[in-house]
Image (tube, coloured by chain):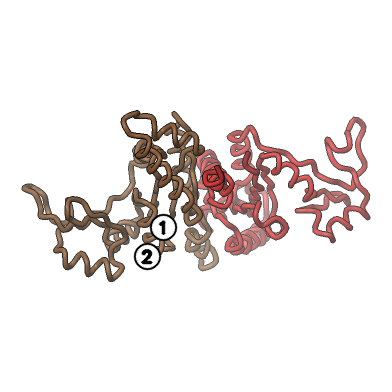
Chain colours: A red, B brown
Amino acid sequence: MNKGLIFVISGPAGSGKGTVVAALREMLPDIGFSVSATTRAPRPGEVDGVNYHYISRERFTEMLDGGEILEHTEYCGNFYGTPKSEAVRVIESGRDIILEIEVEGALQVKRLLPEDTVTVMLIAPDRAELERRLRGRGTETDDVIKTRLQRAVTEVGLAENYDYVVINETGKAEECAAKLLSIVKAEHSKYSRMKSTVEAYSAE
Amino acid sequence: MNKGLIFVISGPAGSGKGTVVAALREMLPDIGFSVSATTRAPRPGEVDGVNYHYISRERFTEMLDGGEILEHTEYCGNFYGTPKSEAVRVIESGRDIILEIEVEGALQVKRLLPEDTVTVMLIAPDRAELERRLRGRGTETDDVIKTRLQRAVTEVGLAENYDYVVINETGKAEECAAKLLSIVKAEHSKYSRMKSTVEAYSAE
């Protein structure tokens, strides 16, 4: 059985990442899930190790410093993150994982598990279309839009650190998800991941 | 428009390459074709530059020595080969090329056009199945089969020089072709090939 892989998907504002990744998950019914760690208290009915791994803030910080948390975020004063050990357990069982994270976090995952991580950045077809999408809702001021646009453009500029860049053409989220699916399949056929199969030929 | 790529597909005896590549070509109606060069004389009705580029044996050898022929073979005393200039013309026009060639030729193409060449080796699932396939026809002596088996195993051992290794499960040529199609699509999304699209964002 082949090992799973971690597919890290980033998409600046206006890339349409949410819709595309939802469509991709539909196409990958056997995808694995890693249980996140959190510093928030369990809610009634939640089970430790099932909903989350509930740990103290001290422990979380310690794990972060030790490179034991692949990626994390802070929300309402609590930390949420993916323990490296959890992700490794899932991929060792042969299942892939999809992590949707922003640029900085994506590069951190790649640094911590370089052999097992594949990074993909989703982008709008061009800057004009990106701006149209950001203006789309028509609820924000020009200044807010300009700031968001500038930030998105800066993030696209960091694509050189990614393995793949996929354009999400307007109205073609399914087609874009199919491209991501191609990347998932192709990565499993890389020589480095087929090595043991090939070596078994000569070993017999 | 993005540049095309050269997909070099090799498959030792018993890999079922013929069927798989035929299925792949069905899935890629827009694939490009490069006109081969040959040292044989044109037959009635054949047109230079359409059927083949008809060149002298001296010119062919000269091109070969100069690294101007991507891959070649000799048949009935005549040379047949793919001129590098032809392949470059096709991929510059944005179309991909598929070349079905054996191991030595495959590595030569990769050496001559490293940035534009993707190499894939097709293999049988395992050695036992490979042997079953080679014995399949039942028309050859045990010695002949053993020699072919040994040669195929040696070739599979050279897979480490390939970018991808794809297993052709018995009776699943279509599925195998779909995997090759994934590789074709994924390779076009590599950052290096999306660089100009990404750079246009900041240039505007």
Residue B37 percent across, percent down from the top left: 21, 58
Q: Of the numbered discs in the image, which one, if any, rests on residue B117?
A: 1
User: Is B22 left or right of A87, judged from the image as shown?
Assistant: left
Is B137 situated above or below A13?
Answer: above
Report the residue at 88% width, 53% height from top: A60
Residue B104 percent across, percent down from the top left: 37, 57
Binning the other alpha carbons within 10 Å of mark 2 as few (below 14), some (14 to 19) or many (20 upward) gives some
Q: Quadrant of residue B60?
A: bottom left
B79 or A22, which lies in front?
A: B79
Q: Chain of mark 1?
A: B
**Residue A5 seen in this snapshot:** yes
Report the residue at 22% width, 70% height from top: B62
Q: Chain of mark 2?
A: B
The lab-note entry on whether marks 2 and 1 share a chain reads yes
Residue A80 percent across, percent down from the top left: 82, 48
Q: As drawn, which residue projects farthest toward the left?
A: B44
Q: Are marks 2 and 1 in contact (CB under 8 Å)?
A: yes
Q: Secondary structure at mark 2?
A: helix
Q: Of the numbered discs in the image, which one, if any, rests on residue A28?
A: none
B167 or B2, which lies in front?
A: B167
Q: Looking at numbered disc 2 in the image, what kind of residue is underneath it? A: Leu
B97 or A8, which lies in front?
A: B97
Q: Looking at numbered disc 1 in the image, what kind of residue is underneath it? A: Thr
User: Is B157 left or right of A62, judged from the image as shown?
Assistant: left
Residues at marks 2 and 1, CA–CA distance in whole angstroms: 9 Å
The N terminus of chain B is located in which quarter?
A: bottom left
Which residue does the numbered mark 2 point to in the structure image? B112
Q: Quadrant of residue B113?
A: bottom left
N-terminal of the pair, mark 2 or mark 1, is 2
Report the residue at 59% width, 46% height from top: A196
**Residue A183 seen in this snapshot:** no
